[in-house]
Image (spheres, coloured by chain):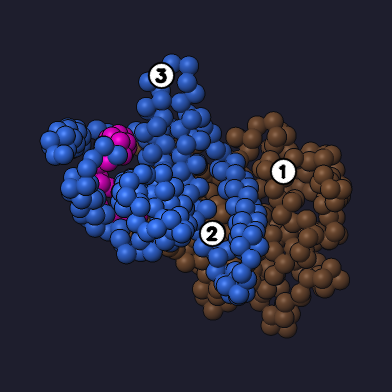
Chain colours: A brown, B blue
């Protein structure tokens, strides 16, 4: 469980990015954090695994401050960045996925097993010897996910996972996210584009100018999203359950 | 862009232990500077064969190396003008001597051959393999932070392709906005260097963030490569060949 208490983030130039955020994220949730550009979504999620440190307040993971034990936190909370290119750290797909497990000091056999499992789960096993930069956008995002899965986290943060993807890429990545959620992984996803996956979320949180202005079930929050410069998806009769790009697959 | 990128494959170089490759390439980089022309061509021929075997496109490599033509020209000029001997044209304008021109060509050939050697290493060796090798090597010496040095060296080597990729992107953006019409060399240099460094610093920042998120530590478990007998034989044969070439090299005037 993640607890955020009175989180304030002020950058050295004086910009107030986050203002008194109080939030609890429970195990098994699929939480969507929505907001316009510059609303503080990425800044907020980067605090969850200690990539940014609060100016005031604290972030707790299972009751412990995340900055006290970054290694534990980062193993438990995987982070998939917005730009998949910038998180490629290996020169082959296999090498990239092994990066995290190697840092965690697992045995050679354990690393091999975790890498193989993650590649199978993301459907990249056949491409394990390919240079990551030769993959398509959707494949790169799946590779980023594989790199995180190999660390076996309980919570995965996706920062704008669909922003560089085409239709096929969005469907591939979204399917993987849903499978992970079904298996019990807590999903935290930031976006300003709700139509692609809101139907699957259990909770919708709106961030506006660094403050949480709405927090609740998607059905309760959806009608006020346009007040905060977020496009309200059309869907069928504007029902939340139709706000997904996986409709033709019979999901949900 | 393929320069200094790892190119997956199954050639003899891909399969050879990275430590052995590194040592052989270091030794041959020194040998090249001791050789006379006929032997240089023999080594060059061997390098080209290995490049072909590793499926590294020589034509593409040459094209990408043309980006450094100004740098090569400066080395050529410095070498050509620093050599005495017969002056080619009357001293109306300063021109290099014939030996100067030959010396300039000679140094450029050797430089290209050393670059090819570097390419043979970087194109067939993953950065992680190189890091493990360097880690094992520096661990032999006491009081040296082997893990840190290996990590720094591998990150430095790994940043070359990043730099070249960004250079390529910025260059395309400049061309798209008619940089060729700008005749001011200083303005041209500024127009490439400033955005290039801004991009690189941003990328470095992103990579550092991604590494942190995946628990980066200098002490990451090194996946040391086994050293089969085959690699040991390759090492001995390479060294013997180098010695034989050096001996014959001394025999020709």
The disc at residue A52 is: 1
Quadrant of the image containing the N terminus of chain B: bottom left
- Tell me where residue A181 appears, x and y as whole percent: 58, 56
Q: Nearer the viewer, mark 3 or mark 1?
A: 3
B190 magenta-colored: no
- The answer to which of B104 and B122 lies nearer the viewer is B104
Q: Is residue A109 left or right of residue A62?
A: left
Label 2, label 3: how far apart the Cα atoms are: 38 Å
The quadrant where residue B212 appears: top right
The numbered dot on residue B167 is: 2
Q: Residue at x 78, y 56 (%)?
A: A40
| Classed neighbour count for the residue bearing mark 3: other residues with Cα under 10 Å, few (<14), some (14–19), many (≥20) | few
Position of A76 with respect to B85 (left or right) is: right
A78 or A249, nearer to the observer: A78
Disc 1 is attached to a residue of which chain? A
Does dot 1 land on a helix, a strand or a loop?
A: loop
Residue A98 visible here: no
Q: Which residue corresponds to mark 3?
A: B141
Q: Residues within 10 Å of mark 2 (few under 14, many from 20)?
A: many
What's drawn in magenta, residue-wise? Answer: B7-32
Q: Residue at x 64, y 66 (%)?
A: B184
**Secondary element at tag 3:** loop
**Host chain of mark 3:** B
Label 3–label 1 contact, CB within 8 A: no
Position in image of residue B209 (x %, y %): 62, 46
Q: Residue at x 76, y 47 (%)?
A: A24
């Amino acid at each position: 469980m993640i607890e955020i208490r009175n989180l304030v983030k002020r950058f050295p130039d004086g910009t107030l990015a986050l203002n008194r955020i109080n939030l609890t994220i429970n195990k098994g949730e699929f939480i969507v954090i929505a907001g316009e550009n510059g609303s503080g979504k990425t800044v907020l999620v980067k605090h969850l695994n200690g990539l940014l440190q609060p100016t005031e307040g604290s972030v707790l993971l299972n009751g412990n401050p995340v900055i006290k034990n970054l290694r534990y936190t980062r193993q438990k909370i995987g982070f998939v960045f917005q730009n998949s290119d910038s998180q490629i750290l290996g020169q082959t797909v296999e090498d990239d996925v092994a990066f995290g497990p190697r840092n965690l000091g697992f045995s050679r056999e354990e690393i091999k097993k975790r890498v193989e499992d993650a590649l199978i789960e993301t459907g990249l096993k056949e491409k394990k010897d390919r240079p990551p930069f030769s993959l398509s956008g959707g494949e790169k995002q799946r590779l980023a996910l594989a790199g995180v899965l190999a660390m076996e986290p309980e919570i995965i943060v996706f920062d704008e996972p669909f922003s560089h993807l085409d239709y096929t890429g969005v469907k591939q990545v979204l399917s993987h996210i849903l499978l992970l959620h079904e298996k019990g992984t807590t999903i935290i996803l930031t976006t300003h584009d709700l139509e692609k996956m809101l139907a699957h979320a259990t909770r919708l949180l709106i961030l506006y100018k660094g403050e949480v202005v709405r927090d609740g079930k998607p059905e309760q929050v959806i009608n006020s999203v346009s007040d905060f410069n977020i496009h309200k998806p059309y869907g069928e009769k504007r029902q939340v359950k139709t706000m997904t790009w996986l409709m033709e697959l019979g999901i949900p | 862009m393929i320069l200094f990128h790892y190119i997956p494959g199954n050639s003899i170089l891909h399969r050879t232990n990275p430590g052995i490759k590194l040592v052989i390439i270091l030794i041959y980089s020194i040998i090249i500077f001791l050789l006379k022309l006929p032997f240089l061509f023999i080594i060059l021929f061997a390098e080209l064969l290995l490049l072909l075997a590793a499926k590294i496109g020589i034509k593409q490599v040459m094209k990408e190396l043309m980006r450094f033509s100004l740098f090569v020209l400066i080395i050529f000029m410095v070498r050509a003008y620093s050599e005495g001997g017969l002056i080619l044209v009357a001293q109306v304008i300063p021109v290099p001597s014939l030996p100067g021109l030959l010396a300039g060509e000679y140094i450029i050939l050797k430089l290209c051959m050393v670059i090819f050697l570097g390419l043979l290493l970087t194109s067939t060796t993953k950065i992680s393999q190189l890091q493990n090798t360097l880690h094992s090597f520096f661990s032999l010496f006491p009081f040296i932070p082997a893990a840190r040095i290996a990590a720094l060296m591998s990150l430095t080597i790994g940043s070359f392709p990043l730099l070249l990729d960004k250079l390529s992107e910025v260059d395309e953006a400049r061309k798209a906005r008619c940089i060729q019409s700008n005749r001011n060399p200083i303005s041209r240099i500024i127009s490439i260097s400033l955005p290039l460094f801004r991009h690189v610093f941003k990328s470095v920042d992103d990579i550092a963030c991604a590494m942190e998120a995946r628990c980066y530590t200098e002490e990451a478990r090194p996946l040391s490569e086994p050293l089969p007998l085959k690699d040991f034989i390759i090492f001995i044969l390479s060294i013997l060949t180098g010695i034989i070439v050096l001996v014959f090299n001394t025999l020709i005037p």
